Image: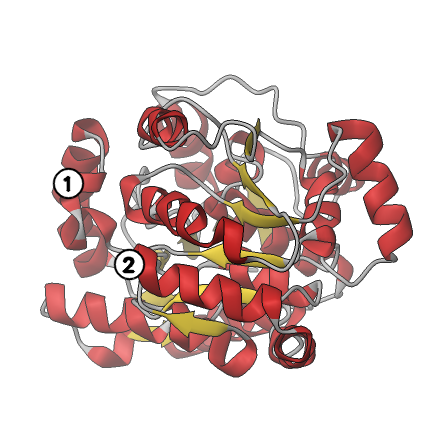
């Protein structure tokens, strides 16, 4: 029997991030959907089979107390990989951090090429690791999963690759993102966060490419033109990136009373924010996929995104797409918030578009890729 090894580090170490969500959802779907690969699948902790009750328990609880192991590959992966004689190794975190043994097929998932497209937005450490390892990763990989056509095109433009080795398999919103009753949603946000006013929402990181200073300037322009007072709620882990600049800008524009930074919000609470928001705005300049807009749309939230990178491909006609400058963003916010019919139309279109994506289908396509590779090569 052939053995497949899936690197599940991100599911444990980076919960709530795009990489963590991707790994966790694939593994959960392999368990829940009963996908029969006819192979043994192991995840990275030695001697634990992916179908075990303990793995199910670990993934659902997302035990994230593991310490990051700087020598992860040598300490936890190299020995079991070599001992098991792995037939296929899947590295879903942009292919970084692993060395497939001789004879093993390598499948990698590439989420984006930010260090090549917008290097100025990356830390020096990550930029160095990514640009040093990625040429080897894409050359060594037998199959590359790109999460969007935009990422596929970035790969083809950046590296001399055979297009036949790249397969586009999109991500999807978690099933927890769905329409909820407004009364319960608002009561929960009032009790936990003291949030009782209508609001415009952003959820994501503070990288400069997220373009949050443009969102704040747009909000400053449009706030007084809205039919009723709206706050701006910006959810994300504070500290790095543009966070200090955002706080300074809010103060300089005298918006401290109106702009809230709740910080990190547990995943279980995010559907409440999405459902309660009058509009979700995602002004990012570059995304390999962009899950937050799709999560908002799955909740039926009127969604506004910048018309750049992969976002038009992901949101389709389910969101209002606009240029990423403050004036264009302000006009889009006013259009959604001040026109009830426009908001209602966007809710309907958002739900329809989000319904076209599912992690079950994504996992099925990944499993089919495994099967095809093993059938062809073995």
Up the image or down, 333 lies above or below 247; here it is below
Q: Nearer the viewer, residue 247 or 34?
A: 247
Left or right, 40 with reference to 348: left
Q: What x and y, as percent, mark residue 304?
A: 49, 65
Residue 284 is tagged as none
Up the image or down, 244 lies above or below 19; here it is above
Say few, some or many: other residues with alpha carbon within 10 Å of mark 1 (under 14 / 14 to 19 / 20 or more). Answer: few
Point out the image quarter for the N terminus.
bottom right
Residue 120 is tagged as 1
Say few, some or many: other residues with alpha carbon within 10 Å of mark 2 (under 14 / 14 to 19 / 20 or more). Answer: some
The total of numbered circles placed on residues is: 2
Q: Which mark sits nearer the N-terminus, 1 or 2?
A: 1
At x 68%, y 44%, the residue is: 270
Which one is closest to the eye, mark 1 or mark 2?
2
Up the image or down, 59 lies above or below 250; here it is below
Q: Which residue carries the number 2 mark?
A: 325
Under tag 1, what secondary structure?
helix
At x 69%, y 48%, the residue is: 198
| Whether residue 378 is visible | no
């Amino acid at each position: 029997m052939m053995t497949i090894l899936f690197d599940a580090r991100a599911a444990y170490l980076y919960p709530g991030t795009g990489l963590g969500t991707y790994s966790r959802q694939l593994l959960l779907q392999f368990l829940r959907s009963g996908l029969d690969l006819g192979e043994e699948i192991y995840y990275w902790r030695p001697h634990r089979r992916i179908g075990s009750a303990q793995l199910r328990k670990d993934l659902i609880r997302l035990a994230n107390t593991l310490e990051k192991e700087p020598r992860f590959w040598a300490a936890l992966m190299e020995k079991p990989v070599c001992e098991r004689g792995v037939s296929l190794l899947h590295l879903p975190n942009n292919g970084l951090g692993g060395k497939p043994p001789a004879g093993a097929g390598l499948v990698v998932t590439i989420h984006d090429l930010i260090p090549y497209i917008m290097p100025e937005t990356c830390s020096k450490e990550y930029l160095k690791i990514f640009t040093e390892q990625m040429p080897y990763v894409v050359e060594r990989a037998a199959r590359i999963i790109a999460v969007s056509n935009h990422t596929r095109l970035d790969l083809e433009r950046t590296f001399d690759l055979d297009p036949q080795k790249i397969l586009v398999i999109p991500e999807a919103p978690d099933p927890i993102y769905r329409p909820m009753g407004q009364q319960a949603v608002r009561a929960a946000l009032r009790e936990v966060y003291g949030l009782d006013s209508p609001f415009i929402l952003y959820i994501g990181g503070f990288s400069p490419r997220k373009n949050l200073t443009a969102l704040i300037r747009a909000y400053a322009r449009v706030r007084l033109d809205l039919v009723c007072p709206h706050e701006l709620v910006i959810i994300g882990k504070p500290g790095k990136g543009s966070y200090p600049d955002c706080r300074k800008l809010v103060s300089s524009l005298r918006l401290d009373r109106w702009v809230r930074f709740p910080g990190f919000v547990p995943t279980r609470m995010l559907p409440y924010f999405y459902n309660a928001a009058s509009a979700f705005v995602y002004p990012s300049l570059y995304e390999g996929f962009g899950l937050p807009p799709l999560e908002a749309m799955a909740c039926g939230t009127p969604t506004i995104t910048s018309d750049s990178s992969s976002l038009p491909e992901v949101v389709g006609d389910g969101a209002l797409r606009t240029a990423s400058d403050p004036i264009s963003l302000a006009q889009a916010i006013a259009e959604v918030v001040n026109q009830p019919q426009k908001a209602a139309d966007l809710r309907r279109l958002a739900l329809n578009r989000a319904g076209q994506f599912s992690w079950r289908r994504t996992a099925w396509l990944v499993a089919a890729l495994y099967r095809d590779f093993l059938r062809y090569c073995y």
